[in-house]
Amino acid sequence: MTSARALVLGLALIVSPAGGCAAVAAQPPATAPTPAPDPDPEHARLAAITGRWTVTQSLWEKPGQAPRVDHGTAHFSMVLDGRHLRQELHIDGPGKPFDGLGYIGYDNATGQYFSTWMDINFPGMVLAQGSFDPVSAVYTFKGSMADAGKPGARIPLREVLHVIDDKHFTYEYYEDHGAGEALTVRLEYAREG
C-alpha cells in the first residue's frame, strides 16, 4: 500500500450505525527512534558554545561616540538534531529590555556557515554566510539587512564571533551605511557557573 493511500485511509471518516461519524486513525508501526548521527567537526565546534552565558553589550548609536553599555543573559542550545545552534538573548537596557533570537549553523552541502538573527527592534531578519578560521578561532559572516529608512535598499554587514576559550567569546556586528564599515554592537560572553 502506498503511503498516500494509507494516509487517505487513516484519515477517512466512517459513518457509524448510530448516524454519527467516528474518525479512524491509522496507527503507525512502533519503531525505535533513529539516533542522531555523531556530529561532524563543524557542528561539534558549534555545540561547544551551548549553555548559559552572562553578556555585556556595548552599543554604538553613532560612530565615534562612546558606546552605551548594558548587561544581560544568553542561552545557547543545539536544535534540530544538533544541526543548528540557537541563541536566545536578553539585555536589560534602559527603557525597555532587548530580546533577540538567532541561529548559527553549518551547511555541509555548501561548506559554509550561516547566521540568522531576529530581534524586537525591527521586523526583518539578518541573513549572513561565512567561514571559520581554526587558527584564530574566528567565525566571520557577511550579509545584509533591509534599510528601514530607504525602502528597497540593503545595508551590508559583517559579523565576527571570536572564541577566546571555553568560558569566553565575543561577537561583533559591523554595518556600512555608505561611509565605510563601523562597529555597531559588541557582545562579550562569559559562561555562567
Image: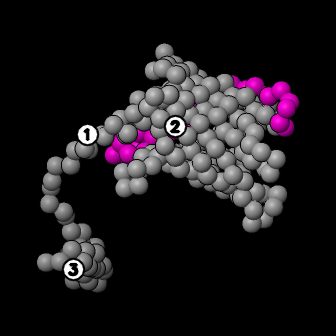
Q: Which of pointers 2 and 3 lies earlier in the amino acid sequence? A: 3
The magenta span reads 62-88
- Image position, residue 106 (x, y; %): 42, 46
Residue drawn 68% across the image and 31% down it: 186
Frontmost of labels 1 and 2 is 2
Residue drawn 67% across the image and 54% down it: 145
Contact (Cβ within 8 Å) of mark 2 with mark 3? no
- Image position, residue 11 (x, y; %): 28, 75
Residue type at mark 2: give it: Tyr
Magenta span includes 44 = no
In the depicted view, which residue is nearer to us: 15 or 105?
A: 105
Frontmost of labels 3 and 1 is 1
In 3D space, how far apart are the residues under numbered discs 3 and 1 (Cα atoms)? 35 Å
Magenta span includes 64 = yes
Frontmost of labels 2 and 3 is 2
Helix, strand or loop for the magenta stretch, by majority? strand
Tell me the colour scheme of the image. Answer: one colour
- Image position, residue 157 (x, y; %): 67, 47
Q: What residue does disc 3 label?
A: 5
Left or right of residue 105: residue 102: right
